[in-house]
């Protein structure tokens, strides 16, 4: 390595703890910060979920007042979405994108540090509302007015926290776009990039386009509450439904923001353990682009029962159903990548396979809900709760865990315990179904969401679901153990190319990866690219 | 000036500014939230401390980047990164305004006609809830929230303001050309003129707000018209203010000779921003004032 | 009067409901479900065959191909065709759901925190005069049992017909005649609520200041239960919708017994439901 690299290494050893973690300009350290933060938040949001499941264990109120239950539900959603899924994908992007495109770091390293550090502060603002007069916001993560405006002191804190999270993710995404477009090693054309980079390039675009819209929505809310405007009040010519349109114009692309990077991760893992190039690389890229485009014109499928004009219902039904087509292309291509491969089932592959199955199940219920008349029966029931946990837990979260198992040896230079990782997997994949599958039945039987108490007819499946919930939650403690053991105690060193058939520039670097990934641009060898075959 | 090596990537050193920035932003938000909730003193103090921290951070951070830039630390790749950063930032701003324009369009196309009785849904809504209300624009809604008001005519101050902003876009472009041609005098002059135009715009808008509040009874409380009017023009005005401050900084830097014919990205970024603010105003003029 | 198709323990599927529309929705739901099951069998089946046949541990050697245009075109077009097949009936059914014309009766439904108010507006082409609005709150026995640590077993709340109606019973249900197309005008009095009777497939958000409508024609008399489905604050789980459908002649008799001098009617029709500014929260 060149002398610059050594100088850089030198610097690494001489920095204090504070300098390293608070003043960092290093994509790996910042990636680690993001991942650790979201890990912590998973346990915060997860413990809210455990409380929710505990109260729903049987009918009648046992643990908390209904208002507190509503606080938990909304905060669980906000924490999981903005505190877990989004930051952990940004953390993965931070770690992997520079390594996958042959760059030394992110394009704007100082901005990168800013993007991260906004988050803990935003969550301090948000979570502190639990201790305020009037409690935390209790109108769900969708924060519909007029209900949300009845909240106490928390409203202003919630709105500003959302502004901060928005700034954080916009800056993060600007950085990712600039990195991908500007820092690729010479010869690494866009259509030779690993799928993970592609998925993030398009996701960043979505983030930059919709986070400001959310900011706009909550800003109007702020004005209605504190400055006497009438945006959401029909008596003044406004409309509560207008909020919902603005919110879902953000909200629907948001759910794809949480799944497209997952698609990227799966497209990395599946070819590696199939020992076969990714099937239909270009189609995969176009499918992501297509999904991203469509995600802007489907938002009202969350509002089928608000009384939209008939034409709008039908339009949004069609556009929503259309998304199944490019998504199907992705599923079929993964399966075909496995077809006639030479498969082995290391831990990351197990999570990827579970992802494909669980996400598809969630997607199917999505398509059912896209049918307007049917959605009239599903809307705001547990059927929807089941849908989005299949795509968010079985989809997004599983892909993140799979990505951690895939790249952790590269990050830490050590191997984790296969036994415990497999136990974690099997326990998770069984319990997650015990947890969320019965929620389909509850929804179909007519149980609305966001209720702390229910009729006795719903008791049995709720109990099953709660048992699955505690089981799934407890299982995640294994994950903590595996990760801590691997990073701090494992004696088993990882090779540079951790997985036999893993291709892509990140595997040409030693494990653990050096402080600055590539100080001079690497030479690109097409056969080393993750999907191997870039001619199609 | 030493030229950076084009073949070696540039990575900046540790920086204390990001963490200071987040602390500043946090205090700012914390203060604002407390103030809004009626904890006036605490809120104002924290807010002011946050604002000062942010200003100090800006001076420090940008000062840092300026020094690096003048030392020639940045290669063309870094320059491109900066450009992309600014471009996508402006892109995000476009969508911020799009949210408010979207709100306005939705209200005008759907809500107000429904409240006024248009179509099947409107017939019910109007007939059962808001009898006697007929859809007009501007409106403060069926309850005439905020009392009767008069909206400002587009052909007075708003028209003048349109002309001011349009010409300021021209003057900033002239200044840019002067910079590229290495002509200092027209650069300083036209940039100064741009600032003057921007400041005049702000002055006139302040006057317009004052008029509306005091004489026309057109306030934030004036139903949906007042709400959309002030949120759109207000956030635009805020952006003009920021833009003007940025122009002033550029003027000072030009006066100090920070830029040369090739290297003046900061100037260009501010010019882009200024054009963006200008385009938003044209949309405002059309959709808020005229239509 | 038998309870129609209220939720039962271990229920796993949508009920067929009690209206033609609800049955058609049930058919659509089942069609979509079977399509998904079939697709699932194909996709997961293929994947599991791959998992078992192409294992490295069984000596499988990886092929090197990575595209096949024909295949890719196929699995773009076939899903589109399937979706069109689902979209067509769904579109026709949506139009039906939206078609409130020809209703013989109109009832205004207003959601409040936390009760429903029902006003009879018109019946058989004539305005209904003088019938007092019905205020429909959670039944008292449910209300007592639902308090934190009430010590009352929810299972012990049983209605006269033997249905365990915890949180699904009200003080005064809405009464409508059987075999009559009823149009519901739905709005909210403070925040957004949602009025839904699953068996009718009648469901609309109750939005303050805006009027929505839905309809149902129920042939079989009975008691039909639903719930408020839009989060509306702390007692969102405690504002059930209960509709009592009675034979037409019985309803007519009931209605004329209710009718009083005309003066009250205007009050019901014009009852102000528009929200004023939300009340500031109490600390
Ligand atoms: C990661 C997040 C994620 C993802 C990826 C999706 C994906 C989809 N979602 Fe989901 N959705 C949510 C998160 C997500 N959703 C959340 C959080 C909510 C609730 C928000 C709230 O109210 O709080 C929600 C709610 C929601 C609703 C609103 C329901 C209601 O409130 O009444 C609808 C309605 O149409 C919907 C539809 C869909 C569809 C059609 C897809 C499609 O993209 C799915 C496409 C995938 C497949 C179809 C499977 C694979 C395809 C094939 C194998 C091809 C062949 C298939 C066919 C031909 C059918 N979603
Ligand atoms: C984005 C991702 C995401 C994730 C990962 C999860 C994860 C989980 N969610 Fe949820 N959820 C949402 C997003 C997510 N959720 C959203 C958006 C909503 C809608 C909110 C709204 O209505 O506004 C929602 C709503 C929601 C509801 C409906 C609430 C209601 O309508 O009232 C329920 C109920 O069961 C639920 C449960 C769970 C459970 C059990 C998990 C589990 O997977 C969590 C597992 C993780 C842990 C448990 C880690 C913590 C572990 C410990 C603390 C160890 C100790 C534990 C034990 C020993 C048991 N979630
Ligand atoms: Cu009323 Cu929920
Ligand atoms: Cu959606």
Image: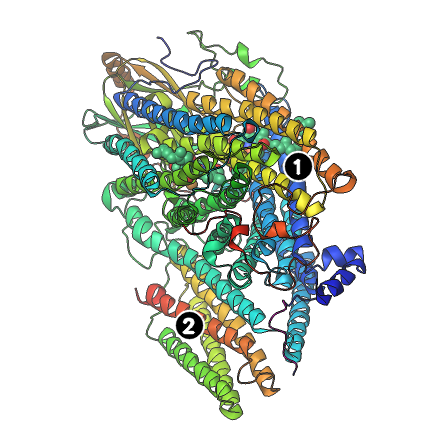
> On the picture, is C21 further left or further right than A68?
left
In the picture, the quarter occupied by the N terminus of chain C is top left
Disc 1 within 8 angstroms of ligand 2 (CB) = yes
Residue B128: give x, y in percent of width and height: 30, 39
Q: Report the image quarter containing ligand 4.
A: top left
Q: Is residue B151 magenta?
A: no
> On the picture, is C92 further left or further right than C212?
left
Cα gap from disc 1 to disc 2, whole angstroms? 47 Å
Tag 1, which chain? Answer: A
- What residue range appears in magenta? B2-9
Q: Which mark is residue A118?
A: none
Tag 2, which chain? Answer: B
Residue B164: give x, y in percent of width and height: 41, 79
Neighbour class for label 2 at 10 Å: few (<14), some, many (≥20)?
many
To which residue does mark 1 refer? A43
Neighbour class for label 1 at 10 Å: few (<14), some, many (≥20)?
some
Q: Which mark is residue B278?
A: 2
């Amino acid at each position: 390595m060149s002398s610059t690299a050594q100088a850089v290494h030198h610097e690494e050893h001489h920095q204090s703890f504070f300098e390293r973690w608070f003043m960092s300009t290093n994509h790996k350290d910042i990636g680690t910060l993001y991942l650790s933060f979201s890990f912590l938040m998973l346990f915060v949001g997860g413990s809210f979920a455990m409380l929710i499941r505990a109260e729903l264990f049987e009918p009648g109120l046992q643990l908390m007042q209904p208002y507190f239950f509503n606080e938990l539900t909304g905060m669980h959603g906000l924490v999981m979405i903005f505190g877990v899924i989004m930051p952990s994908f940004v953390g993965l992007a931070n770690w992997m994108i520079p390594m996958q495109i042959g760059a030394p770091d992110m394009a704007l390293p100082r901005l990168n540090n800013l993007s991260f550090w906004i988050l803990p502060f935003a969550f301090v603002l948000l979570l502190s509302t639990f201790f305020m007069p009037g409690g935390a916001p209790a109108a769900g993560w969708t924060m519909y007015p007029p209900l949300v405006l009845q909240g106490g002191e928390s409203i202003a804190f919630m709105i500003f926290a959302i502004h901060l999270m928005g700034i954080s993710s916009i800056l993060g995404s600007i950085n990712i776009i600039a990195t991908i477009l500007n820092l690729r090693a010479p010869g690494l054309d866009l259509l030779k990039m690993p799928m993970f980079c592609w998925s993030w390039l398009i996701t960043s675009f979505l983030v930059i386009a919709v986070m400001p819209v959310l900011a706009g929505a909550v800003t109007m809310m702020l004005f209605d509450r504190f400055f006497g405007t009438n945006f959401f009040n029909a008596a003044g010519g406004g409309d509560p439904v207008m909020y919902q349109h603005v919110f879902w114009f953000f909200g629907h692309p948001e759910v794809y923001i949480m799944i497209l990077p997952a698609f990227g991760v799966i497209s990395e893992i599946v070819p590696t353990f199939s020992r076969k190039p990714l099937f239909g690389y270009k189609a995969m890229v176009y499918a992501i682009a297509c999904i991203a485009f469509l995600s802007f014109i489907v938002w009202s499928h969350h509002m089928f029962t608000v009384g939209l004009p008939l034409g709008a219902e039908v339009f949004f039904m069609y556009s929503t159903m259309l998304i199944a087509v490019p998504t199907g292309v992705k599923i079929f291509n993964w399966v075909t990548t496995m077809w006639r491969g030479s498969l082995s089932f290391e831990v990351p592959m197990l999570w990827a396979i579970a992802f494909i199955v669980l996400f598809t199940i969630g997607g199917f219920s999505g398509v059912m809900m896209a049918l307007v008349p049917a959605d009239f029966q599903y809307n705001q029931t547990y059927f929807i709760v089941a849908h989005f946990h299949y795509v968010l837990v079985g989809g997004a979260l599983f892909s993140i865990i799979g990505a951690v198992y895939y790249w952790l040896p590269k990050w830490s230079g050590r191997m984790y315990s296969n036994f415990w990782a497999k136990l974690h997997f099997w326990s998770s994949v069984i319990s997650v179904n015990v947890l969320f599958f019965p929620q389909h039945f509850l929804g179909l039987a007519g149980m609305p969401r966001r209720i702390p108490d229910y009729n006795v007819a719903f008791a049995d499946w709720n109990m099953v679901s709660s048992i699955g919930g505690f089981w799934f939650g407890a299982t995640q403690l294994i994950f903590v153990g595996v990760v801590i053991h691997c990073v701090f105690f494992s004696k088993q060193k990882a090779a540079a190319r951790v997985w036999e058939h893993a291709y892509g520039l990140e595997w040409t670097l030693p494990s653990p990866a050096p402080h600055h990934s590539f100080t001079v641009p690497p030479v690109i060898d097409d056969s080393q690219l993750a999907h191997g075959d870039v001619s199609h | 000036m030493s030229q950076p090596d084009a073949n070696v990537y540039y990575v900046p050193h540790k920086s204390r500014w990001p963490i200071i920035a987040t602390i500043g932003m946090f205090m700012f938000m914390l203060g604002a939230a407390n103030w809004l909730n009626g904890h006036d003193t605490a809120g104002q103090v924290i807010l002011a401390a946050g604002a000062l921290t942010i200003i100090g951070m800006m001076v420090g951070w940008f000062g840092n980047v300026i020094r690096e830039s003048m030392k020639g630390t940045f290669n063309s790749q870094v320059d491109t990164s900066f450009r992309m950063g600014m471009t996508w930032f402006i892109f995000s701003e476009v969508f911020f305004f799009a949210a408010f324009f979207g709100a306005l369009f939705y209200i005008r196309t759907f809500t107000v006609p429904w409240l006024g009785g248009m179509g099947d849904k409107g017939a019910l809504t109007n007939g059962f809830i808001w009898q006697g209300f007929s859809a007009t624009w501007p409106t403060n809604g069926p309850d005439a929230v905020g009392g009767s008001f008069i909206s400002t005519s587009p052909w007075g101050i708003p028209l003048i303001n349109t002309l001011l902003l349009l010409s300021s876009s021209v003057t900033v472009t002239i200044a840019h050309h002067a910079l590229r041609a290495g002509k200092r005098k027209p650069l300083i002059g036209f940039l100064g003129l741009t600032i003057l135009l921007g400041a005049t715009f702000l002055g006139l808008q302040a006057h317009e707000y004052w008029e509306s509040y005091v004489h026309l009874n057109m306030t934030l409380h004036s139903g949906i018209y007042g709400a959309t009017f002030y949120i759109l023009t207000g956030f635009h005005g805020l952006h003009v203010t920021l833009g003007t401050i940025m122009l002033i900084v550029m003027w000072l830097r030009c006066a100090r000779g920070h830029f040369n014919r090739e290297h003046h990205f900061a100037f260009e970024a501010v010019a882009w921003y200024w054009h963006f603010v200008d385009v938003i105003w044209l949309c405002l003029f059309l959709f808020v004032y005229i239509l | 009067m038998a309870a129609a198709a209220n939720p039962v323990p271990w229920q796993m599927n949508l009920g067929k409901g009690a209206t033609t529309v609800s049955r058609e929705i049930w058919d659509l739901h089942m069609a979509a479900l079977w399509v998904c099951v079939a697709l699932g069998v194909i996709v997961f089946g293929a994947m599991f065959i791959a998992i078992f046949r192409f294992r490295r541990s069984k000596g499988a050697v990886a092929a090197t191909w990575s595209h096949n245009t024909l295949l890719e075109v196929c699995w773009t077009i076939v899903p589109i065709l399937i979706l069109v097949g689902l979209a067509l009936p769904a579109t026709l059914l949506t139009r039906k759901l939206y078609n409130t014309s020809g209703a013989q009766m109109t009832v205004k439904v207003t959601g409040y925190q936390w009760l429903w108010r029902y006003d009879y507006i018109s019946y058989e082409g004539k305005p209904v005069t003088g019938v007092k609005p019905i205020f429909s709150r959670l039944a008292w026995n449910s209300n007592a049992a639902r308090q934190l640590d009430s010590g009352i077993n929810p299972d012990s709340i049983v209605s006269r017909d033997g249905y365990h109606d915890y949180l699904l019973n009200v003080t005064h249900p809405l009464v409508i005649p059987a075999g009559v197309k009823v149009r519901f005008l739905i709005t909210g009095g403070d925040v957004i609520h949602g009025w839904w009777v699953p068996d009718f497939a009648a469901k609309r958000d109750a939005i303050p200041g805006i009027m929505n409508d839905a309809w149902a024609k129920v042939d079989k008399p009975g008691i039909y239960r639903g719930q408020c489905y839009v989060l509306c604050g702390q007692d969102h789980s405690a504002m059930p919708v209960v509709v009592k459908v009675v034979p037409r002649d019985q309803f007519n008799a009931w209605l004329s017994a209710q009718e009083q001098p005309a003066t009250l009617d205007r009050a019901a029709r014009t009852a102000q439901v528009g929200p004023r500014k939300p009340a500031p929260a109490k600390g």
